[in-house]
Image (cartoon, rainbow, N blue to C red):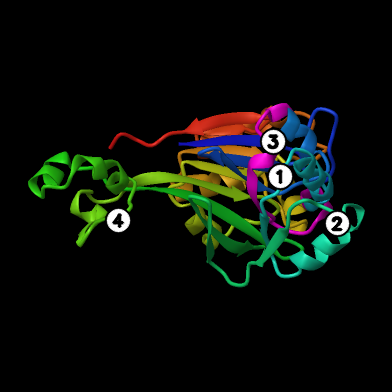
Amino acid sequence: MLDVCLLGCGGMLPLPKRFLTSLLVRHAGKSILIDCGESTQVALHLCGWSVKQIDHILITHFHGDHVVGLPGLFMTMGNNGRTEPVHIWGNPGLQRILDGLLVVCPQLPFSIICHDITECGYQFQAGALQVQAVPVEHRIPCVSYSLSLPRAGKFDAVRAKAQNIPLQYWAALQRGETVTDGEQSYYPEQVLGDPRRGLKITYATDCRPSRELVALAQNSDLFVAEGLYGDIQKQPSAAEKGHMVYAEAAKMAADAQVGQLWLTHYSPAMLDPEEHLPAAQELFPNTKCGSNLMTCTLKFQDV
């Protein structure tokens, strides 16, 4: 399963009751953070999930409301006993951005390893999750991410018994591990069925709709997408700034056949995000307005 917390739902600047947009995804006690604005650390404390367990940070782009919270977060992680390296991913130029931000915290008890996303469809592993990044249209280079947790096939005890595989090796094989006993080796494919449907989250902020983004979000259990404005009449203004309105995000959610859509990254000028939600729900019924610390747990389907 995956625990998901939308730490904030605002864009451009934090407000007293609206933190900047970022997402925290937790699996097996480890976390992945997407974006880190100046209010993200406050939201992390309110969320209650350990900052020490953040192994990977994914950055969509280098606007301030998505990166300037990094120095404070790193200092807090160090003060909480973090010594393992932290991996951070983003567009080329990430190291230069970090070098500037980390002037204020030059002595951290852990290393920060930068990874440049260099191609469309760039894929990498973040713990047990498979991550894919695609470029999206914004005023500066920006990427959207999908995070997938695969699920192995169902363990077949009948097949295991028929092949005389010792009982003590079943758990390891079920985890997908190969077991060697002397000259005899046992392989997961001997006892596992076809891979089952896993879990998938797609995160897209500061961007325009695109076919590539719909393909990235295809069949996601959760699609977290920006809606700078709810009013469709403000679509030209949103497009000029490289953003989306609710209806555009909802249309993509329907096209991608996702499970649910959380809207986020609201303009500070939009005082009531719920006002225009019904229009989005006409296009994609399972649409929700994101809010600070909005949380859910995604679980594997039984099939």
Kind of residue indicated by mark 1: Arg
- Left or right of 40, for residue 118: left
Residue lying at 71% horizontally and 70% vertically, measured from the top left: 92
Query: Mark 3 highlights which residue?
Result: 7
Q: Which of marks 2 and 4 is nearer the N terminus?
A: 2
Farthest residue toward the bottom? 118
Residue 178 — which label? 4
Distance between the alpha carbons at the discs numbered 2 and 1? 17 Å
Query: Mark 1 or mark 4, which is nearer the start of the sequence?
Result: 1
Measured as percent of width and height from the top left, residue 50 is found at: 67, 34
- Magenta part of the protein: which range? 46-66
Q: Position of residue 7 (x, y in %)?
A: 69, 35
Nearer the viewer's eye, disc 2 or disc 4? Answer: 4
Seen from the viewer's position, the closer of residues 287 and 111 is 111
Reading the image, the residue beneath label 2 is 102
User: Distance from label 1 to label 3 (Cα)?
Assistant: 21 Å
Instruction: Choose the circle earlier in sequence order: 2 or 1.
Output: 1
Q: Is mark 2 on a helix, strand or loop?
A: helix
Is residue 219 visible in the rendered structure shown here?
yes
Residue 278 appears in the picture as rendered: no
Quadrant where the N terminus is found in the figure: top left
